[in-house]
Image (cartoon, rainbow, N blue to C red):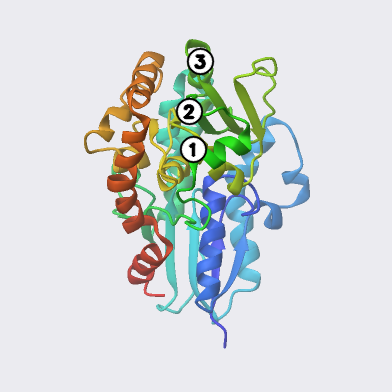
C-alpha cells in the first residue's frame, strides 16, 4: 500500500510566494522518497461562494475558515494509508481524529501574524491590527500548531513561536534550488542585460506590499542615480520608473531570470519590515552576490559575522543606513563577492543544500 502524506496550506503551491515555494519543494522531496502527497488549500477546498467574494470582510473570513474547509475535505479521503499530516501557517487547526498513534502530525511556522502585525502597525488600521494580532495569530495560528511537532523557518521565528504560543520548535530553514541559484559570469550576465562594463548595479527582488518596504528601494534609486537598478517585481505592475533609463523592471520574472539579475549585480537589497526567512537573501548569496538587508531571519543567520555584518541594517526604515551599506560594497565589489563565496556560501550549503536539508528533515520527522 502506497503511503500518503497530507499537506495543508493556505494557498495553492502554484501561486508565487515563499510558503508556496516551500510547499512545492516539500511535494517534490516527499514524492522522490515514494510518498503520495496530497495538498489541500483554499483553492481546492473552500466553497466558491466564499472564495470568490471580493470584499475585505469576506477575504478575512475566508482566511480564517480555510483551515475548517481544508480539514473537512481531507477527512473525506483519510484512511490508514495516511502516515503524516504537515500543516502550515493558519491551516491546521481542524482536529484530524485518528485512533492510530502512529499518525505523525507536523506544523511549520513561516512567521507569525502577531510579529507581522507589530512590524507594520503604522501601515494598517487599528481594527486590522487587532484582528491580525489577536484573532488570526493568537487564536487561529496558535490552534494550528497545538498538539503537533512544530518546526520554524528561522531562529527568530522559533523564538516568536515560543514567546507567543508557548510551543517549543526546531529551526529547519528552507531548501534552495542550487541548480538555478549558483555563481555565474557577471560579465556575461551584464552583457545579456545591456549593461556597460564598469558600471555599478543593484537589484531588488520582491513586491510592493507594505511588508517588503518598497519605499526604501524608491529612496535609494533617487539618492543614487548613478547606479543601474534591476527590479524583479511580482504582482502589482510598477510603471513609475518608465522614463528612467537606469531602472529596468522585470515583471513576474522566472527563477532563471532572477538568477541572472543577481549575477549581474554588485549587490541586492532586502529592506523588508518583517520577513521570517526571505528566500531572496539566500538566493542572492547562493549566486555569490552580497545582499544588504534589514535584520530578519535569513539576514541575521547569513550576515552575522564581520565583515558581512556591515551589510546588516539595524533600522529597516533608514535610507541613510542602506546608502552607507551600498557605498561600503561599491568601494570594493570584487572583494565582497569573494567574501560571500568563501564565507557565506559554505554556511548556506550546509543548511540549505537539498541533500543536507532533506537529511535533517527526515531525521526530525522519522518519515
Q: Which residue carries the number 1 mark?
A: 135
Q: Which residue carries the number 3 mark?
A: 226
Circle on res. 130: 2
Looking at this view, name the residue that lies furthest to the front. Answer: 197
| Label whose residue precedes the other's in the sequence (3 or 2) | 2
Task: Provide residue 261's location: percent of width, then percent of height.
Answer: 55, 38
> In this rendering, which labeled residue sits more in front, label 3 or label 1?
3
Which image quadrant: the N terminus?
bottom right
Task: Provide residue 287's location: percent of width, then percent of height.
Answer: 45, 46
Task: Provide residue 94's location: percent of width, then percent of height.
Answer: 53, 58
24 to 184, vertically: above or below: below
Would you say the residues marked 1 and 2 are in contact, meaning their CB atoms lie under 8 Å apart?
yes
Which residue occupies the foreground of this view, 291 or 100? 291
Query: Which quadrant would residue 361 be assigned to in this image?
Result: bottom left
241 to 202, vertically: above or below: above
| Label whose residue precedes the other's in the sequence (3 or 1) | 1
> In this rendering, which labeled residue sits more in front, label 3 or label 2?
3
Describe residue 81's horizontal placement relative to residue 101 as left or right. right
Report crowding for label 3: few under 14, some 14 to 19, many 20 or more residues within 10 A (C-alpha): few
> At x 57% / y 51%, what residue is drawn?
20
- The span from disc 3 to disc 2 (Cα, nearest Å) is 43 Å
Which residue occupies the foreground of this view, 107 or 171? 171
- The span from disc 3 to disc 1 (Cα, nearest Å) is 47 Å
Amino acid at each position: 500500500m502506497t503511503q500518503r502524506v497530507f499537506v495543508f496550506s493556505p494557498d495553492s503551491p502554484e501561486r508565487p510566494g515563499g510558503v508556496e515555494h516551500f510547499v512545492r519543494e516539500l511535494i517534490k522531496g516527499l514524492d522522490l522518497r515514494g510518498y503520495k502527497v496530497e495538498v489541500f488549500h483554499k483553492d481546492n477546498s473552500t466553497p466558491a461562494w466564499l472564495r470568490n467574494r471580493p470584499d475585505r470582510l469576506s477575504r478575512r473570513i475566508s482566511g480564517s475558515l480555510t483551515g475548517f474547509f481544508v480539514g473537512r475535505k481531507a477527512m473525506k479521503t483519510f484512511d490508514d494509508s495516511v502516515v503524516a499530516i504537515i500543516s502550515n501557517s493558519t491551516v491546521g487547526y481542524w482536529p484530524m481524529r485518528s485512533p492510530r498513534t502512529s499518525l505523525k502530525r507536523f506544523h511549520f511556522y513561516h512567521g507569525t501574524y502577531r510579529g507581522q502585525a507589530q512590524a507594520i502597525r503604522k501601515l494598517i488600521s487599528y481594527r486590522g491590527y487587532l484582528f491580525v494580532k489577536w484573532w488570526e495569530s493568537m487564536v487561529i495560528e496558535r490552534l494550528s500548531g497545538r498538539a503537533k511537532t512544530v518546526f520554524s523557518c528561522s531562529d527568530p521565528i522559533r523564538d516568536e513561536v515560543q514567546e507567543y504560543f508557548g510551543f517549543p520548535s526546531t529551526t529547519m530553514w528552507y531548501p534552495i534550488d542550487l541548480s538555478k541559484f549558483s555563481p555565474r559570469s557577471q560579465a556575461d550576465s551584464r552583457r545579456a542585460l545591456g549593461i556597460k562594463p564598469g558600471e555599478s548595479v543593484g537589484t531588488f527582488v520582491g513586491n510592493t506590499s507594505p511588508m517588503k518596504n518598497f519605499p526604501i528601494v524608491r529612496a535609494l534609486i533617487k539618492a543614487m542615480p548613478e547606479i543601474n537598478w534591476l527590479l524583479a517585481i511580482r504582482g502589482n505592475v510598477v510603471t513609475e520608473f518608465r522614463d528612467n533609463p537606469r531602472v529596468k523592471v522585470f515583471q513576474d520574472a522566472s527563477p532563471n531570470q532572477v538568477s541572472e539579475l543577481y549575477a549581474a549585480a554588485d549587490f541586492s537589497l532586502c529592506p523588508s519590515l518583517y520577513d521570517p526567512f526571505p528566500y531572496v537573501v539566500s538566493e542572492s548569496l547562493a549566486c555569490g552576490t552580497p545582499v544588504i538587508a534589514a535584520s530578519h531571519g535569513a539576514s541575521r543567520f547569513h550576515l552575522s559575522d564581520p565583515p558581512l555584518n556591515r551589510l546588516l541594517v539595524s533600522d529597516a526604515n533608514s535610507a541613510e543606513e542602506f546608502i552607507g551599506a551600498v557605498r561600503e560594497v561599491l568601494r570594493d565589489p570584487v572583494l565582497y563577492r569573494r567574501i560571500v563565496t568563501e564565507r557565506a556560501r559554505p554556511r548556506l550549503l550546509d543548511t540549505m543544500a537539498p541533500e543536507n536539508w532533506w537529511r535533517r528533515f527526515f531525521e526530525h520527522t522519522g518519515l
